[in-house]
Amino acid sequence: MLLFSSTEQLIYWILIALPSILIASTIHEYAHGYVAYKLGDPTAKMEGRLSLNPLVHIDPIGVISMIFFRFGWSKPVPINEYNFEKRELYTALTALAGPISNLIVAIVVALINHFLIKDTWVLIVFLLYTFTTINIALAVFNLLPIPPLDGHKIVRGILPKKLRYHWEQLERYSLILILLLVMPFSPLSKFVFSFINNTLTLILTFLGF
């Protein structure tokens, strides 16, 4: 199966989509580290990860995977939740910070497009649309309650103690769940990406794209 159906699609992916993904991922990881630091965990700052420099957050294998398979990852910002006064709650807030940061960026870019750019420069509108789409998709994907995604930690933070232990046990199946999530013919993959596409369409329409 060809991942790129044309040279134009390959060029778009390398020159526009991939840089947008790297920037969106950098903002996402920085938000995790910043909120964790504010809540009492200095781990990200001590390891030099509290930065908006994309090079700090790049995972080489993740980038290579993004180039060739259109699915990849950044290095997760290190968080030591035992530095938090309220471990589950503050871990959930730290996890939530990543997706929220991407949604905020998407809203700001949409406002710039609406008030300053719209119907003026087609190329810039296209670039803003791509960047907005990637930020929204990254936020929605990470909000899925599947380990090791942010959504799993967020749900853990609001569950009663009696259920929290059983929810945490799902983490032992993280690799299997992620593989099922990204495999093209997996029922889980079809359901999740259909949900993401529908949510993406709704949000983009709401933002005026």
Image (tube, grey):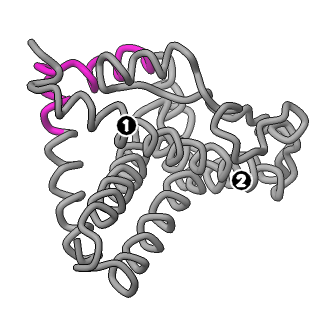
The tag on residue 88 is: none
Within 10 Å of the Cα at label 1, are there few (<14), some (14-19), or many (20+) other Cα atoms? few
Left of 57 or right of it: where is 115?
Answer: left
Q: Position of residue 145 (x, y in %)?
A: 40, 42
Assess whether mark 1 and mark 2 are in contact (beta carbons under 8 angstroms): no
- Secondary structure beneath dot 1 equals helix
Q: Position of residue 175 (x, y in %)?
A: 42, 15
The answer to whether residue 169 is visible is: yes
Amino acid type shown at disc 1: Leu
Q: Position of residue 49 (x, y in %)?
A: 77, 37
140 and 65: which is toward the camera: 65
209 and 88: which is toward the camera: 209
Mainly helix, strand or loop, the magenta region? helix
Amino acid type shown at disc 2: Tyr
- Secondary structure beneath dot 2 equals helix
Left of 189 or right of it: where is 154?
Answer: right
At x 48%, y 20%, the residue is 62
Relative to 200, is 155 above or below?
A: above
Q: Is residue 176 magenta?
A: yes
At x 50%, y 68%, the residue is 104
Q: Which residues are magenta?
A: 173-191
Residue 178 position by quadrant: top left
Left of 161 or right of it: where is 208?
Answer: left
Residue 136 position by quadrant: bottom left
The tag on residue 90 is: 2
Q: Position of residue 105 (x, y in %)?
A: 49, 64
Gap in angstroms between the C-alphas marked 2 and 1: 37 Å
Name the residue that disc number 1 marks: 15
Q: Is residue 110 magenta?
A: no
98 and 67: which is toward the camera: 67
Specify the quadrant that holds the N terminus: top left
